[in-house]
Amino acid sequence: MLKVKRSVIEEIKKQAEAGYPYEICGFLLGEVDYRNNVRTAVEAFQVENQNKERANDRFEIDPKDYLKVEKYADEKGLVITGIYHTHPDHPDRPSQTDLRFAQPDMSYIIMSVKNGKAENWRSWELKGDRFAQEDVEFI
Ligand SMILES: [Zn+2]
């Protein structure tokens, strides 16, 4: 499950609406409790969507950005606990592409943005070879 600060969701909403009609993406930073598989997200770190051609329905993260975020998280004593991205004018459900690039033990927040307004969002985690919606609690 994911425990997330309300401010993180508010931040993602802001980024989602500012980036519309393109997909925005970023990393969730926090802690992981491996004993009960609980991840937390206390910060949202936006990175540039490298996919310019299909930025309305695809996102790609530059490996350099990944390293940058890891360094930043490390300095703050946090770890990467997930990835968030938006679906402009599409539901908050993972696509086939999302599934292809998904990693285990991570939370995937997908936020749906309709006509420039952030609407619904859900968090997903990989269960075997498919995505399952995960429980979310605010902290
Ligand atoms: Zn997606």
Image: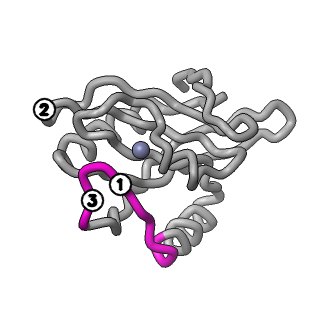
Q: Which image quadrant: the C terminus? A: top right
- Residue 77 image offset from top left, x and y in percent: 65, 58
Of 29 and 108, nearer the camera is 108
Mark carried by residue 54 = 3
From the viewer's perspective, is residue 72 above or below residue 59?
below
Which residue appears at 35% of the width and 54% of the height? 58
In the picture, residue 60 is in which quadrant? bottom left
Of 43 and 133, nearer the camera is 133
Indicate which label's residue lies in the foreground, 3 or 2.
3
- Residue 86 image offset from top left, x and y in percent: 34, 42
Q: CA distance from mark 3 to mark 1?
A: 6 Å
Q: Which residue corresponds to mark 1?
A: 58
Magenta residues? 53-65
Q: Earlier in the sequence, mark 3 or mark 2?
A: 3
Q: Which image quadrant: the N terminus? A: top right
Is ligand 1 less than 8 Å from the beta carbon at label 1?
Answer: yes
Q: Residue furthest left?
A: 115
**Image quadrant, ligand 1:** top left
